Amino acid sequence: MTLAEKAGQMTQHSWGFGSDEVARKEAATGMLGSVLNAPSLEERNRVQKLALESRLGVPLIFGRDVIHGYKTIFPISLGLAASFEPQLAERTARAAAREAAEVGIDWTFAPMVDVTRDPRWGRVAESFGEDPCLTSAMGAAMVRGFQGSPGDAERIAACAKHFAGYGATESGKEYNTTWIPEPLLRDLYLPPFRACVEAGVMTMMTGFNDLNGIPASGNAFLLRKILKGEWDFSGFVVSDWASMAEMIKHGLCEDDADVAKVSAKAGVDLEMATRTYAKHLPQLVEAGVVPVAVLDDAVRRILRVKHELGLFDEPYRKTAATSVAVCAEHLALAREAAQRSVVLLKNEGALLPLRKELRSLAVLGPLADAPLEQLGSWSYDGAVEAAVTPLAALRARLGADVKLEYVAALPDCRSGDASGIQAAVDAAARSEIALLFVGEPANLSGECRSRAFLELPGIQAELVMRVAATGTPVVLIIMAGRPLTIGAVCAQARAVLYNWQTGTMAGPALADILFGDVAPSGKLPISFPRTVGQVPVYYAHKNTGRPPKQDRPQIPTGTPLDPVDFDASYVDVEVTPEFPFGFGLSYAKFEYGRVQVTPARVRQGETVRVQAELRNTGATAGVEVVQLYVRDRVGSVTRPVRELKGFQRVALAAGQSKTVQLELPTAALAFTDADLQERVEPGKFEIFVGGDSRAPLGAELELV
Ligand code: BGC
């Protein structure tokens, strides 16, 4: 290959950005490696033909963001994470791959495995939440789902993004600076990427963020040292969209040539959207600034992935004889995934499930019948016409003997127009139960959708208050792409379901839950703050030297000398979150019994078996997500008060009990010490098993 051909392989054209005509010429002369967002299967194959007819005939790889479904939309990642079920994530990714592959998409830019503790950040919707253990399991499962196995025609390449630290964006503001000390980077932000590498992810994407002074797209420490060095990653690294050229604005690079030099040396193999590689790499090599070995390594990686995907054998894709898009099987999966994502936050007096004898129901709120909103961000390919809203599902389900009154009340979630509220109030007053659908529109979360306020947008809180004032019991159903501060509105409702944006089958899945065909089983993958001022609030915090003695505001009275507890708390709000990580109720009632660890004294390299008694003392069947947390009492560096180390969904019939077994390999106790070494230290560990991150102490373990 000539230097120009090598630089060409390292270039991706973003369709519609810059000249597509120029991109066609690049493909025809072997100066292009990849295309993002080809507009159709036909166009894809036409450009592919140009590439195949070039001197070397290397096929292009075509990418697109297939994030939580393609035509059939599954729950947003944050919702899916609430299922705590990696196999479910794997199946949804598989279905998405099948739908995408049949229209010529070879490669998706998912999963996003950025851990984040900041609900202000819009991309929290695309994340699996605040925990590295859960994110690792869900991310690796999606990689397996997208990529299937070699030779499989329905596989697409996955891409773990955004490497790394993007979720730590300062003040939750999109694209903002990140400062992450190396131990925290290694213990919190990197493990999910490593899990994806271990699952065989073919590609990785850099982030837009400046990490500790070096933007991720020019960060040799991340890409060369850790990813390609320590982890021996053999796939290729793509930049984020124009993120390389943005290093000029970051103030790291002088001009495009400088960008090409910095990114190539740092280990970015493929440039997305911009053309600094194509324009400058050949000269930089000739001038001796960039070693040719850098290009050879990058091209080898790109060709290897193309080869593994079978693009050299089958460069074209044909229109499928029978399309799998939105097929019955995928819709059933979407319904199942949505059911398992919903989190029951409150159920006073067992208001839910709704009684069979119910004769009148008010369905209210701007999100009861909003097909586009329930699909969430990154669903531009989603089949909106296939989306079944809660209103449609309830109408289809309820017979003529139930009077259903629907009032949207507000034109949309952000509206300040109160003129429709009275009609909703009247409908509620006439009904036995009011189902009230509020939340965020899809376009308030996702990329570049950071929020500084976390309340329900517009005047939705007023709608909740006025409907509740009728005295009719209210079931609040919140559809949103992030944790919102909902304490005040939840207090008005008898039952609250956090419904995220659960996709095409959001309506039927929710109806299944409301009527008790399935009990809710979702658990929060992220802590919900009481107020934005608590952010970041997360369960795996440090103890501090003055852990809070109480969980109530310490409002000082009188003079500054009047006593408060001088501890790590607030004077104006409780120190705990509104809802903790791992929390979620069921219609069943779960009780935990004795926790046992065997052996209780363990050597490094061994695996501990943790057993817990679980009993369903309720009157209905349900699924509990049993969670295992560990606290390392004393370390050579201080350790979090607890960390999730395992979880398992356990189905129990009414009255049934079971001994649940979880495995804890001692390797899971490793952390990064003050010398930046990953190690497992001997000592005492506390073991907590329960239904959320407040699980009580169950047993002790000693590592010798
Ligand atoms: C996003 C990526 C996405 C890429 C390609 C960027 O703006 O940050 O997550 O994969 O665009 O569409």
Image (cartoon, rainbow, N blue to C red):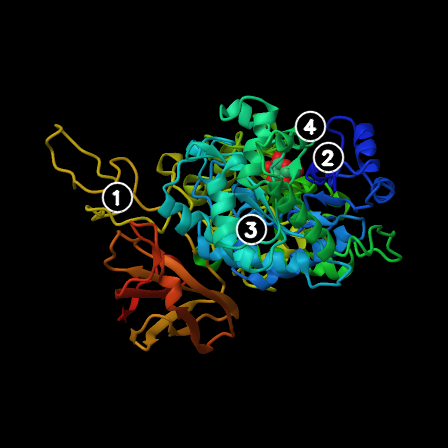
Residue type of the residue flagged with mark 2: Ala
CB at disc 4 and ligand 1 closer than 8 Å: no
Picture quadrant of residue 60:
top right
Residue type of the residue flagged with mark 3: Gly
Residue 704: x, y in percent? 26, 71
- At numbered mark 2, what does the secondary structure look like: helix, strand or loop? helix
- At numbered mark 1, what does the secondary structure look like: helix, strand or loop? loop
Picture disc at residue 66 = none
Residue 593: x, y in percent? 35, 73
Which residue, given by chain and number where applicable, does mark 3 sit on?
79
Looking at the image, tell me whether mark 4 or mark 1 is earlier in sequence order: 4
Picture disc at residue 552 = 1
Dot 1 alpha-carbon crowd within 10 angstroms: few under 14, some 14 to 19, many 20 or more = some
The single residue placed furthest to the left in the displayed view is 561
The reply, left or right, for residue 566 in relation to residue 174 is left
Which residue, given by chain and number where applicable, does mark 4 sit on?
279
Tag in front: 2 or 3: 2
- At numbered mark 4, what does the secondary structure look like: helix, strand or loop? helix
Which residue, given by chain and number where applicable, does mark 2 sit on?
4
Looking at the image, tell me whether mark 3 or mark 4 is earlier in sequence order: 3
Q: In this rendering, is residue 615 above or below 388?
A: below
Q: In this rendering, is residue 610 above or below 572?
A: below
The reply, left or right, for residue 285 in relation to residue 138 is right
The single residue placed furthest to the right in the displayed view is 321
For ligand 1, give the image quadrant: top right
CA distance for labels 3 and 1: 30 Å
Residue 25: x, y in percent? 83, 32
Dot 2 alpha-carbon crowd within 10 angstroms: few under 14, some 14 to 19, many 20 or more = many
Looking at the image, tell me whether mark 1 or mark 2 is earlier in sequence order: 2
Residue type of the residue flagged with mark 4: Lys
